[in-house]
Image (cartoon, helix red, strand yellow):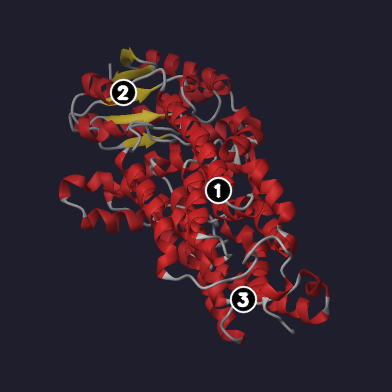
Amino acid sequence: MAAAPPSSRSPDLGPAWHRLVSIGPRRVWPVVLVAAIAGALFAAFPQARLHHDGCWMLWHHASGDYWRALHVAQLPLAALLGAILPTDRFLAAPWLLSGLCGGLGLAGSGLLLLRFGAAPLRAAAVVALLAATPALVFWSTQVDTHSLHFAAIAWSLLALTFAARLPGATGVLVGALCVIPPAWAHQSTPILLPGFVLLFLRSRGCEPRELWQRSGLVAAVRVGLAFGAAFAVAIAVSSLLRTGELPFVGSFFGDSQRGEQLDMIESAQRYQAVASASWPQWLWTFLGLLPLGLFGWWRAGRERLWLLAFLAPGTVFFLWYRVPEMGGHYLHQLPVYGLLVHFALPRGRAALGICLGLAAVHTYAAVDAVRDFDRGFDPRRRAALLVELGGPNPLVVEFVQDLPNAAMWHAGVVRSVRNQELIEALRTDFDAELFGTVAAEQLATALGPPIWAQGRAVLVDLTDPGSFDRIPRADVVAPYLAAVERALDARFQVTRAEADGWRVLRVEPR
């Protein structure tokens, strides 16, 4: 495939646009400075309340069970960071990892802008705009893998532009290795395969029209097979580390995640989706980036194909998936949105003004989103309530899959039971009264006796999920929680406690 340098075929959109240029130290420091400041701010202001995935990540991190998470890179990295920090900072490691990854992702995004010819101050201004994006602020101050995935994607895209300049099969091999870390950060990464392949070919100078010629098609197939094989290896290694078996042997997700993950996919639109989980969430994620992104894509010329191939699969998939992740599933797109903003902005100081103005709007929206997440209740009150009702080290049983209070660790509540049978009951329209009876029987025969024998309390959290952002929806869960409470009243001695929206029962044998 004849491949002329990309710069010779670039449309006239300004100096050095659409070129892959070298990145010297003098050009890097504005971007690195902005990214470092943003990462430090993320790390300095962790949220006290956990989103629903953060709770089990924190349990596994504290228990040393680092390889159980579906997205395998998060917890081992948190454990490594925890080993470096002083002992009393151990539980701070997952938050610090999210903040650091937010900063690293911004640095990688900025270097990608420089690689595509953006001037240093222009790139720094775009990075500042990305840093204020509400979803990035939210997830860089939470315990979760979305910030890590953002960083992995940013650096993977940057690395691909360098790997593509290596000759022949060597470049393809190095490029394939570049896509493995993002796959370990989040297992949705393989849906980005078309974007990775086309960026790699474009970085080699392949014109979009050449992809319809025999030589271009052959090159695309070869690169696609190599990158696809890398994804397959990454997923296989992830599965072996987590479950000891290869994917699709028994369960792709492994026993620990099978019921939750598969049921979430199958029942998302029926029971677990909320209004903000689809189009509104996607729009909220990017705010001012969207109009600039659309204009930038129109101006992107020969880059349009790979940009569309990268953005479209993830957008379509997660708009269909509709899990309320506060925009986290779209963070992998931010490095590419940075490029689109770069293509859209005018030259000169006007570009800096636009970026800083939008960054101010984004900052206000981001701070308001975090405050709204905590608004209306004290996240530390639940920990105090559990200790008041259950004493030291109680067993907490909950039927809704969220445990959003990091303060529990400091209050002595160190373990919880998440009753995933409720998800299956909702999916199959299981009778609510029968569900309550079965739940009470399970507590009386399996969960309760060994805990009571140790002199510990058994607490059942029946908090109405409508008070928070929990999954499934409150109107669906309410009859089941009411049935559980009636069954517990009929079988056990029950003591109730409520505070700030939390509703907890202490259950003891009669």
Q: Of helix, strand and loop, which one carries label 2?
A: helix
State the residue at coordinates (62%, 69%).
Answer: 19
Three-letter amino acid code at the position of disc 2: Arg
Q: Residues within 10 Å of mark 2 (few under 14, many from 20)?
A: many
Residue beneath disc 1:
349
Name which residue lies at 24% across and 29% down: 394
Across and down, in percent, residue 169 comes to 60, 85
Q: Earlier in the sequence, mark 2 or mark 3?
A: 3
Residue at far front of view: 348
User: From the viewer's perspective, is 137 left or right of 261?
Assistant: left
Identify which residue, 297 or 430, lies in the foreground: 297
| Circle 1 Cα neighbour tier, 10 Å, few/some/many (<14 / 14–19 / ≥20) | few
Q: Is residue 393 above or below residue 489?
A: below
Residue 84 drawn at (x, y percent): 22, 57
Which of the 4 image quadrants contains residue 353? top right
Instruction: Report the mark closest to the observer, 1 or 3.
Output: 1
Identify residue for label 2.
382
Name of the residue lying farthest toward the right: 213
Residue 231: numbered disc: none
Name the element at disc 1: helix
Structural distance between the alpha carbons of marks 1 and 3: 43 Å
Name the quadrant of the C terminus. Answer: top left
Q: Is residue 12 above or below residue 99?
A: below
Is residue 385 something that shows in the picture?
Answer: yes
